[in-house]
Image (spheres, rainbow, N blue to C red):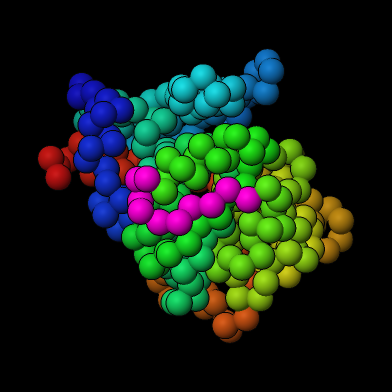
Amino acid sequence: MRVIGEDEVRKRLTYEVAIPIVRAAMIALSRGETRQHLRSIIPLAEGRMFGIMPGALGEQGAFGAKLISIFPENFALGQPSHQGVVVLFDPDSGAPVCVAHAGEVTAIRTAAASAVATDALARPDATRLAILGYGEQAQTHLRALRQVRPIDHVTVWGRSPERAGAFAAQMAAETGLPVVAVGDVEGAVGEADIICTVSGAEEPILKGAWVRPGTHLNLVGSSRPGPVEVDDDLVAASRFIADSREGVLAQGAEFLNAKASGRVSDDHVVGEIGQVLSGAIPGRQSRDQITAYKSLGHIVQDLASVQALFSSRM
């Protein structure tokens, strides 16, 4: 059995590699060519979780599962908050053939999926990015979105002004872009063309009244019922696209809250990003429309990424 560690994933699964892989995986999912169950999440003590995600890349394709722990406090200690493995099985023999570092795969493929959605839904001239959060996904999203839009200005907000400032300085040095920490969410998003919510918020931090027409949103931080990052007004005002419609109807917290309040129905989830990519449904319908991509993440993104690492030396 081959083991693909964190360093190898980071070196070989670049955004140039990951973005087309994830794009193809999301099209295949929406066409019904892959198989997956909804993730199972086991709550642990102190806000920690253990997740299990099984799936298959089609009836004749590789199959496997991601086993991952989520320990939010690790980030402050300089350790990954998501830790685990992706196990890949051979479709011919049924044998496990590869184990890959799930934390690094998750970090890269999640941002790559948001980049795919941004490329499909954001205005072509979008250049100003706002990031709400300063953790691992904030870093990967900034790196990934630069691959699909000519980002020339970045604002960052986080609960700790000191950490937000440190993140801004780090990413400005890395990218050469003006990355500015802003003390309030409204100020951070006021001029944004693209907003990424990658926080650990339990209650809405972003209000619809603060988002200007034509903005594209990547809603990433909440991956289960309960925690929400944006308010019902913003959900209701947006053209709402899922990574997996089944997943969002069952586990997309922002959508579920807006539905419970009577603001939207199931029809508000107009489809999946894979359907937009294949041309089955339209994406952005006007320059002033607010678009929202709800990311829960699905196992076929992980399996496709690991399969590519396993089957080639890239």
Residue 121 point in image, percent of width and height? 50, 70
Residue 112 point in image, percent of width and height? 39, 52
Closer-to-camera residue (62/71): 71
Residue furthest right as drawn: 261
Position of residue 295 relative to residue 103, above or below, is below
Position of residue 286 relative to residue 28, above or below, is below
Residue 286: name its quadrant: bottom right
| In this rendering, position of residue 188 left or right of residue 206 | left
Q: Residue at x 23, y 37 (%)?
A: 11
| In this rendering, position of residue 57 left or right of residue 266 | left
Q: Quadrant of the C terminus?
A: top left
Magenta part of the chain: 173-182
Q: Quadrant of the N terminus?
A: top left
Residue furthest top as drawn: 45
| In this rendering, position of residue 221 left or right of residue 36 | right
On whether residue 181 falls in the magenta region, the answer is: yes
Instruction: Evaluate whether residue 214 shows in this view.
Output: yes
Residue 28 point in image, percent of width and height? 38, 58
Position of residue 156 relative to residue 92, above or below, is below
| In this rendering, position of residue 204 left or right of residue 88 | right
Residue 74 point in image, percent of width and height? 53, 21
Q: Residue at x 37, y 33 (%)?
A: 104
Instruction: Evaluate whether residue 242 shows in this view.
Output: no
Closer-to-camera residue (84/148): 148
Q: Residue at x 65, y 18 (%)?
A: 44
